[in-house]
Image: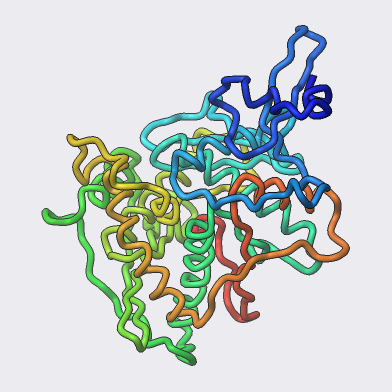
Amino acid sequence: QRLVCAVAGLRDPSAEAGDARLIPGLPAALVAEREPLRGEYRTWAGPVLVDADRVRPRADVRTLAEALARVPVLTDRLAGVLDEPDPGALPQLPAALVRSSVAGEVLVSGSARADLARLEAVCRAAELLLGKGEPGLEGGAGPVVGAGTVHARGRALRQAGAVRQQGAYARETAGPFGGAAPVPWSPEPGRHPQALHWWSVLVRRLGVDADVAVSRLDTVGGGAVFHAEVQVQGRTTTGGALGTAVEASADDAVAFAALSAVVRVQAAADAPPARHLVTPSGASASLVRPEATAPWEDAGWTTAWLAESAAREPELQKALTALTGWSPQPWQPPADAHADVRALCSALRQCGFSVLSARPRHRTHPTLSEGSR
């Protein structure tokens, strides 16, 4: 049918499918199944079209709704390139957890909502698969994936900022870095509702004997970045950091660090043994628009909180760029990359996702956990 229409100069019949699941501007493929017998159009996120006159640059994803609409395309069981994150029987409160498979390994992702957890899972799964296509990469040193340039930059810069903060404690002050200053923080009235909420969930509901250390990282230009690290005390766990965050305010940093800790505690108790654990950051807030907030939603609601954080994101990214002396650049698969890596990179860009290079790490810096991504 499509071939006949093309020869006759008629419009592509897939455009008349009337399926809201099809992404405008992306090619559609008619997929037929034998059992049960059926056929339907699905958005095709395969390699870039060969015909140069048919290749059109894809616009970046700019909103959370656009990003979430493309997750089913990338994870379609027949035409997709990634495994679909699924909550299954995992708990959805107090934090929402989803799981997927990456090269035969289990990945668990958590966030304040299941849709945000699914987006984080897709980005991290893509990073792991793309990183395997570049020789010499270890741990989190591979490319950084985001739903559009702003989201990807936020993820990459937060990762670099956390590593730079570790250098501050090691008294590495070369470059435009002014040092780290401790910031007192306690769950008292006047703090942001989300910081108080997730801290209360961690300490009271989950019973974790935790403490939080907050520091302000200053650049010579005067920009401020806040780093929070939730640490465990007593016998609740084996020790070490449960959650970290790099954000534009102390309350945001504590909120995301505490939320990350909640995800980690829940995953340890209720999720199957996972090779990869993905915890949230404020980078996803850059996709939230103020108009998405309902009139009755105040700062205690997740959407309103993320919209507030989105307003601070441009200045945070500017400060992180000054702090690290580095700006993320587009990533390209190496010349000898496997065909699957090239196909995945192409599919991500066809869907408006961005793939950026991570900041090269100094050998003396400790390896950053996935949670800060």
Q: Position of residue 47 (x, y in %)?
A: 78, 45
Report the residue at 76% width, 7% height from top. 36
Q: Position of residue 111 (x, y in %)?
A: 44, 43
Q: Position of residue 214 (x, y in %)?
A: 31, 68
Q: Nearer the viewer, residue 241 or 168?
A: 168
Report the residue at 47% width, 46% height from top. 264
Do we see residue 34 in this rendering? yes
Outermost residue on the left side: it is 189
Q: Quadrant of the N terminus?
A: top right
Quarter of image, res 70: top right
Do we see residue 268 in this rendering? no
Report the residue at 37% width, 57% height from top. 233
Q: Position of residue 21 (x, y in %)?
A: 57, 27
Outermost residue on the front side: it is 8
Report the residue at 68% width, 36% height from top. 83
Outermost residue on the right side: it is 336
Q: Is residue 234 left or right of residue 104?
A: left
